[in-house]
Image (tube, rainbow, N blue to C red):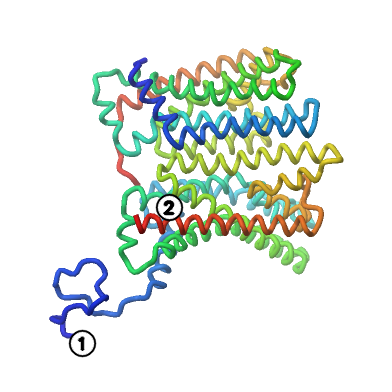
Amino acid sequence: MNRTLFRLSVQAVAGRRRGLVLLVVPVALLVLALVVKGLADGDTGLDATVGLGFSLALPLVALLASTAVLGPEVDDGSIVYLLSKPVSRHVIAVSKYAAAWLTTMLLGALPLGVVALVLDASEPGRAAALGVGGAVAGTVYSALFLGLAALTRHAVVIGLLYTLFWEGVLGSVLSGIRYLSVGAWGREVAHALSPLVGTADVGTVFAVVAALVVTLGSVWFTGDRLRSFTLRGDE
Amino acid sequence: MTDPSTPTPEGRSVIHDLGYRPYTGTRMPPATIARALVVTGFRNAFGLGRSGRSKILPFVLLALNLLPAVIVGGVAAFASLDELPIGYAEYASTTQVLLGIFVASQAPVLFSRDLRHGTIALYLARPLRSGAYALARWASLLAATLVFLVLPIVILYAVALLIELDVSDQTREAAKALGLAVLLALSLAGIAGLIASWSTRRGFAVVATIALLVIANGVVTVIQGISSESSGSTRVGEVAGLFSPYSLYRGLIGAWAGADTPTPPSSTGMELAYVAVFVGLSAACLVALVARYRREATS
């Protein structure tokens, strides 16, 4: 972990228009929560809103944050100046991951808990569980997408295909995909903390172990990719 | 043959006139340039005429989009069903994720690259007006989107005819789906093109487009789901449907193509409002796009 790199990465995430779009996602979720609160009471509204936050808002925030810390530098080639510094490539990867992770926690996981509180303030335990579940899923998502960004220029599209197509469309048809779905691991952890959250039925131990393995593996992989980095021209 | 030693007449030179032997052949009108630009852009959207690596993504997306149609067609043929398991217009609604990713990822190919690398100056120095350039790029994206939307309909229609379903019924349904596909393609191409021309960072433009399309659709879906359950407030769901291209499409197929969707527009006035918002959204995006390139040309 390198302070300067961390600071620069945070600037890359929060800078200008990207920061605005990142803010729009949780704000949209909160506005939706307020509208739903006005429309209906009971758990249907909460389930639908939190479901949207878990399956769309959280991965999108993680994807934006993770690709922001690495993507533009690779795109315009300025990453070579960073890589030429006498800093371990793994330290670079971890610093960049820290910036992406912090953003995902603040703008992806935290709003989940807040939304749950807005919709039903009588169950703070459930809100906390949702926040923690979101934090687990967000941790894995941001690591996974950072690894993708180090692997390929098309990280954004592949990340979108993973979250929207694999987890979303295919996941709703082929139920076995839940074992390979980051969102399901997060929901399982939330369910373990508060039984009010619907279970994803993958087993808490499996969810935690899978989350740990994918996170550590992806961050290590990012460092490893940066260690043997070749810059390609624009297509 | 004109004498090569005579200088280019006033107003005929295009960019450089260094006094060399001028080009004396016929000069094509701007319409020809625009047509060439549209065709190149259309090919580029599928990676044709670009590197092999950039062909992978659009064709993988296209294949994923067509796969269900082929499977559905095969099932209908082998199980000898008397109707297609999925409606023509419903199909695009089922695969909307792939459609969104395709449009969002290929719009930067057409709109961002010239702006980011500064090659836009070379286009704008030619007789083609900046507005025509913007329109040509938009038309390429629209055509590519339409191919993406129409191919599954064609496959399903061909299967329906081959297993000898009622021709007039199927033709009417397919024609309806085509009309709706044009509406959807118009709005998607407009939105994606506008975002890609604003944000010239490729990855960012893709996520911003998807975030706008998918989050808006998700929010609308949640509201519609809730309002269709509580009987008193279906009106809220109908109005909410106006706020995202996908929900507009879903509302219209619910009203016209008989698809089972929550809170479709229930009155003719509401249907008209859906169509008006659809067309108005596309037109607004197009005007903004032309304005964006006009500013680029004058700055």
Q: From this viewpoint, which residue is outermost toward the bottom?
A: B1
Of the pair B162 and A121, the residue shown nearer to us: A121
- Going 60% across and 59% down the picture, which residue do you hit? B150
Q: Amino acid at mark 2?
A: Phe
Image coordinates for residue A147, horizontal then vertical, percent = 43, 27
Q: Which mark is residue B1?
A: 1
Q: Which picture quadrant has residue B168?
A: bottom right
Q: Is residue B19 visible?
A: yes
Where disc 2 sits, the SS reads: helix
Q: Is residue B162 visible?
A: no
The reply to whether the C-beta atoms of the residues labelled 1 and 2 are less than 8 Å apart is no
Of the pair B43 and B247, the residue shown nearer to us: B247
Where disc 1 sits, the SS reads: loop
Q: Which quadrant, please, contains the N terminus of chain A?
A: top left
Residue bearing the label numbered 2: B111
Q: Residues within 10 Å of mark 1 (few under 14, many from 20)?
A: few
Q: Is residue B3 left or right of residue B108?
A: left
Q: Is residue B88 above or below residue A14?
A: below
Q: Are marks 1 and 2 on the same chain?
A: yes
Q: Amino acid at mark 1?
A: Met
- Going 57% across and 18% down the picture, which residue do you hit? A136
Image coordinates for residue B8, horizontal then vertical, percent = 20, 77
Tag 1 subunit? B
Mark 1 or mark 2, which has the lower sequence index? Answer: 1
Image coordinates for residue B13, horizontal then vertical, percent = 24, 73
Q: Which picture quadrant has residue A77?
A: top left
Q: Is residue B277 above or below residue A142?
A: below
- Going 22% across and 79% down the picture, which residue do you hit? B9
Tag 2 subunit? B
